[in-house]
Amino acid sequence: MSLNVSKCCTGTSGTSSSGGGRPGHRKSSLALALTPEDDSMDVYQRNLMDLKYPTVLPPNPQLKALLVFHKSDSICEVVTLACQRHQLDVTLVKSKEEALETLHKSYATAQCYHLIIIDARSTKGLDAEHIARTIRHTHGHHLTTIIAVCKKSFFEKDDALIALLDAGVNRCIAETTNLTLCSVELKQILHSIIRPHNVMSTQQALYTALHRLKEVVLITDDVLRIQYANRATERLLNMRLDEIISKPLGDIFVSDLSTISEQGKSIKEFDGILMVRRKNQESIPMHVRVVPVACIGSAPTHLIFNFDIPGGGMDFIATLPQPKEAPRGSLHSVRRCSFDVRSIASDGLRRTSLAKLTSLPLEAPITKIINLLSQVQENCSADEARLIDKVLDFLKREGLYSPQMKEIRTDDPIATDLIGALLTGPSVYSSRRSSNDSIIRTGNSTRTATIVPAKMKANPIIMELLEESLKWDFDIFKLEEITDYHPLLYLGMEMFRRFDVFATLNIDENVCKAWLAVIEAHYHKSNTYHNSTHAADVMQATGAFITQLASKDMVMDRMDEATALIAAAAHDVDHPGRSSAFLCNSNNPLAILYNDLTVLESHHAAITFKLTLGDDKINIFKNLDKETYKSARSTIIDMILATEMTRHFEHLAKFVSVFGNEMEPRELVQSEEETSILMRRMLIKVADVSNPARPMQYCIEWARRIAEEYFMQTDEEKQRHMPIVMPMFDRATCSIPKSQIGFIEYIIQDMMHAWDGFIDMPELITCMQINYSQWKKYDEQGVNTLADIMAKQPPVGNKSSSSK
Ligand SMILES: Nc1ncnc2c1ncn2[C@@H]1O[C@@H]2COP(=O)(O)O[C@H]2[C@H]1O
């Protein structure tokens, strides 16, 4: 439990709003002035009208400090008194858990701590580095000021201090029992860190205002490359943001721009009529005003463009044809007609994530019902509201969100085969079961847990390649090649290192290495697709997504990152290279064990834990406390099970219902944890089938590998006179392009748009569109078989063959 010093300690509490003023706001006479002139707020407000460029007033809240001290010794006391001297509202906690819980609660109640001071004098009591890192990755704390109180001796060698600073600490201060020294240090921190942070936080308000403005505002750099464009610019140009940003300004003007650049250089404003070119090449005369701005030095670094229609009439922009929404009415309409992803994209799916998510044809009726009921609730009696609350609780439960996937309608038999096999449950394929199918296959030879971890050579070529390991165009096939088919071990260690999994699990690196080696050894090298390169690929995508989420301020906590990476690494372990349908049809012991339900995924999850817990040398969870382990286990199992394709549309619809809605996710689900579960499921699902959205040469190699695996299954089904799960996947006749077109149209496309809308990774969509066009081209050219396609491809990695 946290201890609120302002209530418990003697002396002044920071909540000193006595004597008038807005409740909860400090009086203007307080020491921390947040205005440019460092004056009190009253003076600033009075002078505001005189300012040439008025700034947005920063927030001026009661400042709150959270002190994380293992014990209340003399140093802690001095820091507390110094905080109180500067009228901070102080809360003292004694452990990391208490600190995080306090922050969590403060976030939930829309309070916030502006300053967190951590006792970093000894690692015995508190791991300050870990606490700082965790706080930095906790939502809402990127601008919180974190101070570490260190031993004086720390200042003689820099490594401990640098580690703290790298973990997110803003400043390290030396321990002192001298109140004056401590108070001065704190005052400096208030002025030099907290005040600028407060001012910086106002930028969000400005960006929102700019974005929503009806007027067109566009900013370029000094060489006229577009750096910023607001929503009205997208409308005017009929282009999406990703088609505008970084483009030369010349691309959107018909008129000669030399006057502007010359004017810009001499730092004069421009005001005149220029012809703007819209996406469809239509030209419109616009009144353009250009203001050069010098952000550093005296030469202009940026030019601000403001356009309107000559003679005013800003609503004109609203009357222009808008970037067209994708012509997708519903999943069914997509299914019925074949369509060109390129045309959808070039029509301009808007970049705003919410718009994209809401535009997806995947709203479950339940979302509409919840929205309507919530509206009713606003205008009804308390009793009725309580009843509606109960109804809402029921409606938010699992199962009600499933979209109706009654039938798959396509004229293309290959797509029907593939999508049918992926999306339908056991009833469909078991009905095809023939009397010849009673052979019980013994499971694939399971390896014992005595596998010695592969030795990792610190090969500079591998290390160089791994530097790119968070990029979307990472060459996983090259890694497969240069690690001698141990991509999971190398990539896994790199991901664990980058995301600090060793610290999160409190485990030695060697245990993680051994774990990865054992997991990798339990992937079957004989599978062309479901081998450890696929696992490494999914782990790499997971790392890339986590990084992108963090850059969008949707930071996962450290344990969520670790469990996501672990789930990705293990999600297909011991895959037999045959589908669940095949296992059911052949009465495989796994199908018997799991009652034909979620057979493979249940096995992957179960064997992951069986292997991990079965050998202390690889037990990466052994240092977690009971509760943490329980929660990590549940997350990993949930994520692995989410990769099952029969529930694909259910997961997708629920994700879109919650994240693609105007309402706060929190209002649509029962808890924040539930929101995060939906996000993690979608993360691993997208990572698992992201191969059609990878750069083309990799996409084609993955298509080759999965087709080969499907072909081998068909070969075996024929040979054993079993029902053929995907008859069209016959190596003699199958058209690979057709199968990929179907896979993208039915499974991948909507999911990628939903995910891109959430995470903002336009490269996923771009790659998918390019690949889709290529498959269409091959289809039109009659390039169908694996051999035809491979003849057209440069080899990936160093070898173009399947994995060993
Ligand atoms: N490029 C692809 N073409 C066709 N099917 C694919 C492709 N990529 C993945 N899949 C299928 O999607 C499934 C996702 O779950 P699995 O990894 O169990 O098995 C995967 C394959 O059956």
Image (spheres, rainbow, N blue to C red):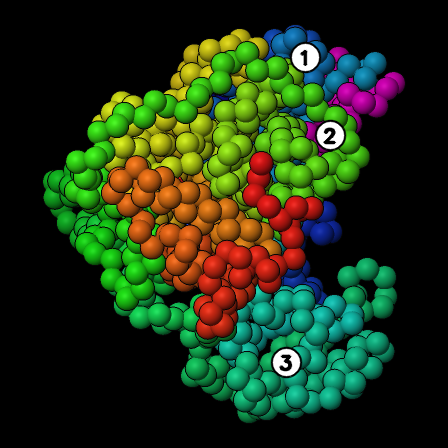
Quarter assignment of residue 679: top left
Q: Which disc is residue 165 wearing?
A: 2
**Position of residue 74 measured from the top left corner of the image (x, y, whole percent):** 69, 9
- Cα distance, mark 2 to mark 3? 44 Å
Number of other residues with Cα within 10 Å of mark 1, as a class: few under 14, some 14 to 19, many 20 or more? few
Q: Mark 3 vs ligand 1: CB under 8 Å?
A: no
Q: Magenta segment, which residues?
A: 155-183
Q: Quadrant of the C terminus?
A: top right
Q: Badge 3 is on which residue?
A: 252
In the rendered view, tell whether residue 441 sits above or below residue 649. Answer: above
Q: Upstream in the sequence, badge 2 or badge 3? A: 2
Asked if residue 565 can be seen in this view, the reply is no
Q: Badge 1 is on which residue?
A: 123
**Position of residue 274 measured from the top left corner of the image (x, y, whole percent):** 65, 89
Residue plotted at (62% across, 44% down): 477
Q: Secondary structure at mark 3?
A: helix
Position of residue 733 in the picture relative to residue 365 (left or right): right
Position of residue 621 in the picture relative to residue 67 (left or right): left
Position of residue 119 in the picture relative to residue 684 (left or right): right
Q: What is the count of numbered marks?
A: 3
Q: Secondary structure at mark 1?
A: loop
